[in-house]
Image (cartoon, rainbow, N blue to C red):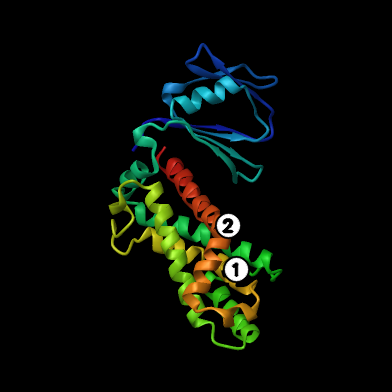
Amino acid sequence: MSTNRALYIEHGVPCVITLDQGVALRIETPHRAPAWYPLQRLGRVQSSTQARWHIDALLACLRQGIPVVFTDRRGQPVAWCYGPRRRERTLTQLLRDALRHADWPDFWRAWVAQIERAECDHFQRRHKLPNGRNNTLQQLHVRAVNHMQQRWKRPPGPWLRATGQAVATLVSAICYDAVSDHTLLHHARPGLHIPSELTRLLQGRVDALLLSINPDDLQQQPPAVFAAKLLDARRPELHRACATMLADLEHCLREWTS
């Protein structure tokens, strides 16, 4: 695990971050003495959106391979800044190190549960459903499938399978771009298959796309052709959702290993 530490710049107190002699961050806060943080000792910075960054301080972090994550009042990430990364700070190396850790299964279960909860909330907001905190993605998927069948007047299975296969291919490509060692993605731990898990976590997004289509479009083309056209039309949305999940995984791994 990395020996560099995380720096937390909290909400509530406005501060100014400048670069001191090119080697340290200087943080000035009203009614407090300035604080210095040498860049060589930092692994990442988590900053409130209230903080005022001088551009030379932010660029110094990025050039040193120190990611800066901006968070809102609830501590949720709203933006990530990355520069040329140190080799040990890439997602590939973070995964490689984390998978060796004895507590990896607990970390992975907690991260998946967090993302699933967020995806359930997103689906329920999008469809103006009551925010049932106990709903799972599978339960919401069953409800969506039943609604498709009622609306389409036919079993939706062929279109669901074709669309699912197309999305799985897209997710695998995104994962391969993000993680250079592909052996980390497939069964690096028993039962672990990261692209398949991300595809499952995107199910609510896929269901939402299918619920929005015109049923008449189903009659005009085979399921595989329909799925390919749907994916071409909505690729940016799905790509962004998957990339955001991977960015969140990287953020959480940095937090966990710092």
Depth check: 76 or 198 in front? 198
Tell me the SS state at disc 1. helix
Q: Which mark is residue 135?
A: none
Q: Name the amino acid, label 2.
A: Glu
List the residue tagged with mark 2: 237
Coordinates of residue 31 in the picture (x, y in percent): 69, 19
Query: Residue 24 appears at what percent x and percent y?
Result: 50, 18
> Mark 1 packing: few (<14 Cα in 10 Å), some, or many (20+)?
some
Quarter of the image where the N terminus is located? top left
Disc 1 marks which amino acid? Leu
Left-right relation of 159 to 125: left
Dot 1 corresponds to which residue?
209
User: Which residue is at a point 65% across and 67% down the rendered structure image?
Assistant: 124
Question: What residue appears at the point 49 percent right and 82 percent down from the top-left corner?
Answer: 157
Q: Residue sitting at 40 percent across and 60 percent down?
A: 195
Q: CA distance from mark 1 to mark 2?
A: 10 Å
| Mark 2 Cα shell of 10 Å, populated few (<14), some (14-19), many (≥20) | few
Q: Residue furthest front?
A: 220
* Residue located at (46% from left, 55% from top): 111
